[in-house]
Amino acid sequence: MALLIPATAQQKGKEIKFAGKVTDVGKDTVTVDHGDIKGFMGAMTMPYKVDKVDILATIKAGDRIEATVYENDYTLYGVKVVPAAAKPAEKAKK
């Protein structure tokens, strides 16, 4: 008996961690400026589709995000905004 794996899982390929800075949010894409992503692509700024369009309502230009991409798929999965680090003066007050 053969094990059936959904075609979409086979097509996605290797999971890769993605991080960058949002430069623009569109109707169904987010444009991200990112550094070199080893095993995926060089540093660039480009628009990406997201797996859940609702996340675009919570993202704005200037936000830093993290997500997962797959080597054969340019969609961002599990997008989350990375909280800005507290400034040194703010840390000292706490």
Image (cartoon, rainbow, N blue to C red):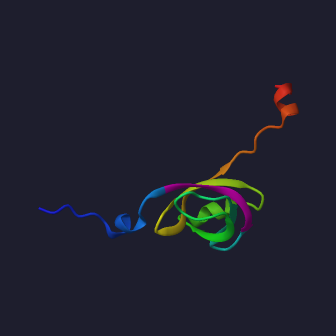
Answer with the quarter of the image where residue 79 lies.
Answer: bottom right
Q: Nearer the viewer, residue 51 or 22?
A: 22
Give how far across and how far down residue 73 sits, in percent. 49, 68
| 25 part of magenta stretch | no
Residue sitting at x 46%, y 56%: 15
Q: Is residue 56 above or below residue 63?
A: below
| 20 part of magenta stretch | yes
Residue sitting at x 54%, y 67%: 75
Quarter of the image that includes the N terminus: bottom left
Give how far across and how far down residue 58 sits, in percent. 69, 58
Q: Magenta part of the protein: which range?
A: 16-24
Number of on-image labels? 0
Most extreme residue toward the bottom is: 27
Q: Main secondary structure of the magenta part?
A: strand
Indicate left or right for 52 with 13 as reference: right
Give how far across and how far down residue 17 sits, in percent. 55, 53
Residue sitting at x 28%, y 63%: 5
Residue sitting at x 16%, y 63%: 2
Quarter of the image that includes the C terminus: top right
Give how far across and how far down residue 35 sits, in percent. 67, 58
Most extreme residue toward the left is: 1
Q: Is residue 77 above or below residue 47?
A: above
Q: Is residue 89 above or below residue 48?
A: above
